[in-house]
Image: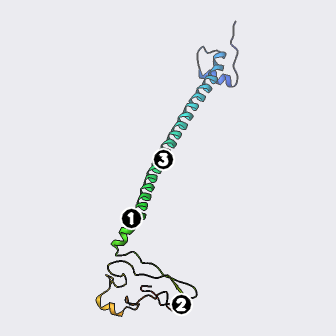
């Protein structure tokens, strides 16, 4: 006369899912096992998603570091170019290529109109003011206003209150 107790509610529904000789102890373990399996599966999926997000960030960081290195190398190369063009020898060579010559001794004009120093002309084959620009036609040269290159600079013994302008100024 061993009669099985009649199950009610949730236990009865779960017992119907597992037909056969499953007793009440077996039915109570099934939800727990399903819960543990779901938690482990969810944790595994969460770890996979987290790992892939971290890998994506790592790849982006690597790309940005490579880009930074390339830009730094380019900046250093441009700085070397600027330094090479700014060197005194390079400036002198380019000035000579443009037809410039070193300037002579300067003269200074004081606020009261006196001239200090003895100006000297630039040392070179021909003065810069006497050369004809390459862009002007020969018929335009006679119509240009400005000082003539034959003007002379005043000497320091000249009258202090009147100073004449130097050529090319």
Decide: few, some or many residues near mark 2? Use Cα within 10 Å; few <14, some 14-19, many ≥20. Answer: some
Rendered-image quadrant of the C terminus: bottom left
Of mark 1 and mark 3, the one earlier in the sequence is: 3
Of mark 2 and mark 1, the one earlier in the sequence is: 1
Mark 3–mark 2 Cα distance, whole angstroms, equals 68 Å
- The residue sitting at 42% across, 85% down in the picture is 168
- The residue sitting at 34% across, 85% down in the picture is 130
- The residue sitting at 58% across, 28% down in the picture is 40
Residue hosting label 1? 89
Mark 1–mark 3 Cα distance, whole angstroms, equals 37 Å
Mark 2–mark 1 Cα distance, whole angstroms, equals 40 Å
Decide: few, some or many residues near mark 1? Use Cα within 10 Å; few <14, some 14-19, many ≥20. Answer: few
In this image, 57 relative to 144: left or right? Answer: right
Q: Are marks 1 and 3 in contact (CB under 8 Å)?
A: no
Helix, strand or loop under label 1: helix
**Residue at the limit of the structure toward the left, as seen here:** 138
Task: In the rendered view, tell whether residue 29 sits above or below residue 103.
Answer: above
- The residue sitting at 40% across, 81% down in the picture is 121
Task: In the rendered view, tell whether residue 32 sits above or below residue 54.
Answer: above
Residue hosting label 3? 65
In this image, 38 relative to 134: left or right? Answer: right
Nearest the camera: 100 or 11? 100
Task: In the rendered view, tell whether residue 79 sits above or below residue 69.
Answer: below
Helix, strand or loop under label 2: loop
> Coloring scheme of the render?
rainbow
In this image, 44 relative to 90: left or right? Answer: right
Image disc number at residue 160: 2
Helix, strand or loop under label 3: helix
**Residue 54 image offset from top left, x and y in percent:** 53, 39
């Amino acid at each position: 006369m061993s009669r099985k107790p009649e199950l009610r509610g949730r236990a009865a529904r779960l017992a119907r899912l597992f037909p056969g000789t499953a007793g009440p102890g077996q039915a109570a373990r099934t939800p727990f096992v399903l819960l543990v399996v779901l938690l482990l599966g969810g944790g595994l999926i969460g770890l996979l998603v987290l790992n892939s997000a971290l890998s994506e960030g790592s790849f982006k960081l690597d790309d940005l570091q490579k880009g930074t290195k390339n830009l730094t190398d380019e900046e250093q190369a441009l700085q070397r170019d600027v330094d090479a063009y700014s060197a005194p020898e390079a400036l002198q060579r380019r000035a000579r290529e443009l037809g410039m010559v070193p300037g002579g001794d300067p003269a200074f004009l004081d606020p009261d109109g006196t001239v200090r120093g003895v100006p000297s002309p630039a040392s070179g084959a021909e003065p810069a003011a006497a050369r004809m620009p390459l862009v002007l036609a020969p018929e335009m040269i006679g119509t240009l206003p400005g000082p003539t290159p034959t003007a002379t600079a005043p000497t320091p013994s000249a009258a202090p209150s009147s100073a004449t302008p130097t050529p090319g100024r």
